[in-house]
Image (cartoon, rainbow, N blue to C red):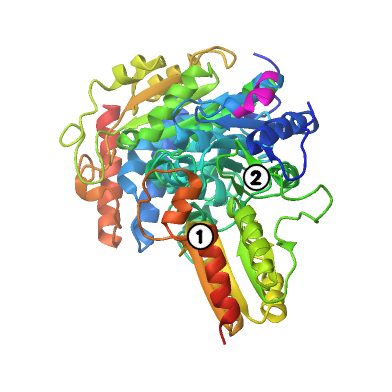
Amino acid sequence: MGSRPLAATDERHSVEELEELAFELRQKLLQLCGTYEGAVHIGGDLSAADIFTVLFHYGLNVDPTDIANPERDRFVLSKGHAAVCMYITMAMRGFFSYEGIVETYGQLDSAYGMHPCKVQLPGVEASTGSLGHGLPLAVGMALSARHRGDEHRVFTLLGDGETGEGSVWEAVMAGRSNRLGNLVAIVDRNRQLMTSFAEERVMFEPYPDKWRAFGWNVVEIDGHDMAQLVGAIDALPAPDSDVPTVIIAETIKGKGVDFMERNLAWHAGSLGAADLERALAALNASREKESV
Amino acid sequence: MPVTFTFGEFLGARSVIGSTLAELGDEYENLWVLTPDIGATLVEFRDKFPERFLDVGLAEQACVGIAAGLAYDGNIPVVSGMLPFLSMRALEQVRTDVCYPNLPVKIIGTHGGLVGNGGSTHYAVEDLALMCALTNMTVTSIGDPLMVGEIIRQSMTMQGPIYIRLAVGKKDKVLYEPGQHEVRIGKGIVARDGSDLTIFTHGTTVAQALDAAEELETQGISTRVVDMFTLKPIDEDLILRCAEETGGRFVVLEDHLAYGGLATRIADVLADRGVQLTAFERLGIPQVYAGFGEDEQLRDKHGYGLSATVEAARRVAAAS
């Protein structure tokens, strides 16, 4: 690969370090969910926490001190309701002040809101929140990079429920038709919509086959297995190749907190002080269980 | 190839779009042209800059979203297509992907109004109401085919988005001689001066208003015709000046729903400024799905054709 002027590649973390960062991210998410009085989309934040971690601490070639560098990798958060997970991950990576997020999230004049706004928060790449918009935006950015001969990639994170939106599949066709090997979609396949489980009312399966049928390079992984996440990033085809990649990351909504996992009640919510302790204890217990 | 034309004759606005974009492609290396399968008029640009031309096929939402992605990365994307679909099927992408971050995406298209005889699926009659509602959006509707080129050119240096509405764009009357009027986005054009009343209009009905004014002249009524080609931001000063100079007598004529388009924009200005008119009539499409027919037949059928315009102007001129 050609010259990569940003600092990121020198700072790649080990799988163990990434697991530790993801744990810390989940703690911070729960803290916010405990202190902020309004609803936090905690279920889909926790399902995506490992994905965010591997992106911002491993996969993305970005530099928090150089956010407009044209050669940076782009990241578009298509599942915009996971904004707070992105803010905190980016804060941990040095983009934003974590205290700033905790102190102002969701408040009047804060740049940190429920869905990300690029105008108010430079550093995020796009204003999103309405579902089905991120992949078309990413296609446009990837086309632009391709046209300029840039070597960076454009990543976007979608929820699986979101891929019910027709605009996603319009962009899937456009990505393949324009041979955008520099485009990487990651699907947080947590198998839950807001009010139902996948397959209950909406049949997604055979899900990876749908992407294959559109001609994409399909990578299926366990989205909570950091080694597999790292492996998927390492195995990405060269940005100047012809086929876009989708990483379908099997996840659990609410991952890490037993009473939130696979629980439709925790699409979004708020924890009181007592429940915060309970959630943090559950997160600790979950880690201990997994390390056995 | 430069466009040749003759004043008063007919010219396709579409060919002006094609040649203008091909020309601007040289000047602006970040100019892209995108279309959802409506590219026939864009061949000049496509052939000259194939690497900056994108036909996504039938996918308006992705087309606008991709344009926004290009604009995020410093490009100037022009999305060209049929307005009923760009303004409605892709409305949320226009609003959320383009207007919310205030990106310099140009949306330019045809089939604004009851034109083209495609039936109500293919008439954009609500588009100006929808576009005027969007924060950051500049909204234009162009009748004179040569003006289209000038508007596209001016829009290149605009920071935010713009909507450029045309009728069918295959055969449009050249209304103005080049240099006859200053063309500036946000400023109305006094296409014909007069003192008894003002007809405000835009797009395809400017020619009809001028014909009406001609007819009214023979009846002793002096009619000012204002080509209010920018609906947003609206030229408030010109509206107020016309209220003063033409006896507070207004007719608003448009190939758009009678409520929600230019007439509404003007009525808002008058209400906000506390201006009391002597008479005000709006001519446009009523709340019906208009059916089939040639453009003029439909305008006559739905009460905003040439004779209806003349009659409305006579009533307004006579009002006390």
For the view shown, which residue lies furthest in the left direction?
A200
Q: Chain of mark 2?
A: B
Q: Nearer the viewer, residue B189 or A277?
A: B189
Q: Which mark is residue B133?
A: 1
Q: Percent from the top left, x then y, of residue B36?
A: 50, 30
The amino acid beneath tag 2 is Pro
Q: Percent from the top left, x then y, of residue A85?
A: 43, 44
Q: Which mark is residue B199?
A: none
Q: Chain of mark 1?
A: B
B42 drawn magenta: yes
Disc 2 packing (10 Å; few <14; some 14–19; many ≥20): many
Q: Nearer the viewer, mark 1 or mark 2?
A: 1
**Residue sitting at 71 percent across and 41 percent down?**
B9
Please identify the dominant SS of the magenta region: helix
The mark nearer the N terminus, 1 or 2, is: 2
Q: Residue under circle 2?
A: B104
In what element is the residue under mark 1?
Answer: loop
**Residue sitting at 27 percent across and 49 percent down?**
A279
